[in-house]
Image (tube, rainbow, N blue to C red):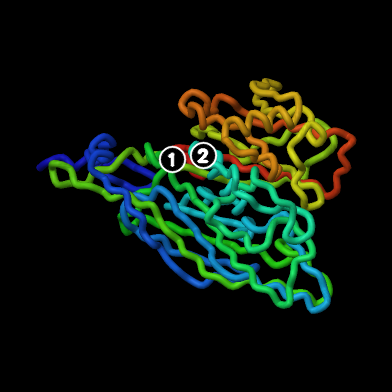
C-alpha cells in the first residue's frame, strides 16, 4: 500500500507538499483583475460585508467609491474635518482562515501605505486644497491623492457652498493582501472550499467627516466596486496544482493610544511577538482632532527603541525625520501629519526587525512643552509578516 502523500500547512490550509514550487508557479501563473462585487454602499455610520471570491491566489483588493455629496445649508454652515475624504472608509478589515487581524486600519492609513510601498507612485503635482475657506488653499504635495480621484469638496475647509449643491466624489483605496506583487509574500490561497475570507467596510458617520451648524445637511450617496488581483493556479507536469510558498501572512494593523503628553513619549507596540518581522511602522498625533504637522516645532527627538534602552535610530526632531521620509517615498507624507520608520523599502531582508530578538519595541516621540495639547491621541499602524502558525 503506497504511503500517503506528504502535506504542508499553509495559512491554516493543508496542501500537498509536492505542489509547492515557486519557480514553476511564477513561470506559469497568469495575473487577473476580477470584479468581486458592485453594490450601493450602506451609508454613513454603517457597514458593508463583502464576500470574497474563492478563486486562485489573492494578492490584493481595490476599493472604489463613486458617488455624490449633496450639501444643503438652510441658513447654517458646512465644513469638512481632517478625516475627509479618505476616512470616509473609517475601517477596513480583512480576515482569512481564522486570522482576524490581517488588515485592520483606516482609509487614510491605506492611502499612506500605498505611497510608501510603491516606489513609482507619487502625489507630486496632484493639486488638492487643504484648510481655509472653500474651495481651500491649494497644495500639490502631500495630498496622498491620485490625479484620477475626485475629493468633491476639499479637506478641512469651511464655508462650503450648498444651495443645495452636488459634488462628485471618486475615491480609491488599495488593500495589500500580499506584501508586494513580485514575491507574493502573504498572498492568500483562496481556491478551496475550506478557505474563509471576509472583508468588512465600516463607513464614518456624518459628524466625523463634516462640521454642520444650524439646519445644514451633508448627504452622501454612492456605489462601491471591489476588484481583486488574482493569480491563476497552474498545473504541474504530474497534473497536480503548483503554488508558491504561502506559509506567511501579511498584516497591516492600526492602533490608537491616548497616552500622549509634553514629554519624550514611549509607546510600546501592540501585538508584538516571536515569529513576526516588522516591516514598517508609521503614525501621527492628533491634537483636538487635527494631526500635528511634522516639524521641529511640534516634535523633538523621534526614533524607536527596544529592550532596556537600545535606540538604533533617533532623529533630532520631526523635521529631520520628515526630510528622510520624503526622500524615501518621493512624497511629503508629513503634510498629513505622518512620520514613518521604514525597514522594508530599501532592503526588507536586511532591515526588517525580528520581534523575537528585538523585544519590547517602542516608539519614541517627544512633544515639546510649548505645544498646547488638547485631547491628544496617537494613531499608529504596524506592517508585519508572520508565519501562519503564529496567528494574528
Q: Nearer the viewer, residue 145 or 307?
A: 145
Residue 88 % position (x, y): 63, 61
Residue on which disc 1 sits: 180
Q: CA distance from mark 1 to mark 2?
A: 8 Å
Residue on which disc 2 sits: 117
> Taking the image as drawn, is residue 75 in sight?
yes
State the residue at coordinates (81%, 70%).
77
Q: Secondary structure at mark 1?
A: loop
State the residue at coordinates (22%, 47%).
234
Residue 81 % position (x, y): 74, 58
On screen, residue 356 above or below 385: above
Task: Indicate left or right for 256 with 37 as reference.
Answer: right
Q: Say which mark, if any, is on residue 88.
A: none
Task: Indicate left or right for 249 with 44 as reference.
Answer: left
Task: Indicate left or right for 88 with 41 as reference.
Answer: right
Residue 251 % position (x, y): 51, 44
Amino acid at each position: 500500500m503506497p504511503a500517503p502523500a506528504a502535506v504542508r500547512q499553509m495559512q491554516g490550509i493543508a496542501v500537498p507538499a509536492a505542489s509547492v514550487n515557486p519557480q514553476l508557479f511564477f513561470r506559469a501563473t497568469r495575473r487577473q483583475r476580477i470584479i468581486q462585487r458592485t453594490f450601493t454602499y450602506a451609508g454613513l455610520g454603517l457597514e458593508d460585508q463583502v464576500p470574497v471570491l474563492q478563486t486562485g491566489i489573492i494578492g490584493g483588493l481595490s476599493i472604489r467609491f463613486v458617488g455624490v455629496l449633496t450639501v444643503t445649508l438652510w441658513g447654517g454652515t458646512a465644513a469638512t474635518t481632517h478625516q475627509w475624504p479618505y476616512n470616509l472608509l473609517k475601517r477596513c478589515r480583512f480576515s482569512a482562515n481564522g486570522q482576524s487581524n490581517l488588515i485592520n486600519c483606516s482609509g487614510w492609513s491605506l492611502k499612506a501605505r500605498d505611497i510608501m510601498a510603491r516606489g513609482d507612485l507619487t502625489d507630486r503635482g496632484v493639486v488638492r486644497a487643504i484648510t481655509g475657506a472653500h474651495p481651500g488653499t491649494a497644495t500639490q504635495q502631500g495630498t496622498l491623492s491620485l490625479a484620477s480621484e475626485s475629493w468633491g469638496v476639499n479637506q478641512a475647509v469651511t464655508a462650503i457652498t450648498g444651495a443645495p449643491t452636488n459634488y462628485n466624489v471618486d475615491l480609491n483605496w488599495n488593500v495589500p493582501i500580499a506584501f508586494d506583487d513580485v514575491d507574493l509574500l502573504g498572498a492568500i490561497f483562496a481556491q478551496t472550499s475550506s478557505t474563509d475570507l471576509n472583508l468588512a467596510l465600516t463607513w464614518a458617520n456624518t459628524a466625523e467627516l463634516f462640521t454642520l451648524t444650524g439646519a445644514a445637511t451633508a448627504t452622501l450617496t454612492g456605489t462601491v466596486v471591489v476588484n481583486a488581483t488574482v493569480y491563476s493556479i497552474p498545473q504541474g507536469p504530474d497534473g497536480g496544482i503548483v503554488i508558491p510558498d504561502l506559509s506567511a501572512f501579511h498584516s497591516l494593523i492600526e492602533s490608537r493610544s491616548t497616552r500622549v503628553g509634553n514629554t519624550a513619549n514611549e509607546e510600546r507596540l501592540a501585538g508584538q511577538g516571536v515569529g513576526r518581522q516588522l516591516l514598517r511602522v508609521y503614525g501621527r498625533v492628533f491634537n483636538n482632532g487635527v494631526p500635528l504637522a511634522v516639524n521641529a516645532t511640534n516634535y523633538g527627538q523621534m526614533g524607536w527603541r527596544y529592550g532596556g534602552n537600545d535606540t538604533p535610530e533617533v532623529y533630532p526632531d520631526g523635521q529631520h525625520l520628515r526630510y528622510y521620509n520624503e526622500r524615501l517615498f518621493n512624497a511629503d507624507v508629513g503634510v498629513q501629519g505622518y512620520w514613518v520608520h521604514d525597514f522594508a523599502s530599501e532592503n526588507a531582508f536586511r532591515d526588517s526587525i525580528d520581534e523575537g530578538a528585538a523585544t519590547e519595541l517602542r516608539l519614541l516621540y517627544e512633544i515639546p512643552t510649548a505645544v498646547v495639547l488638547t485631547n491628544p491621541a496617537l494613531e499608529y499602524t504596524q506592517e508585519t509578516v508572520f508565519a501562519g502558525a503564529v496567528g494574528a
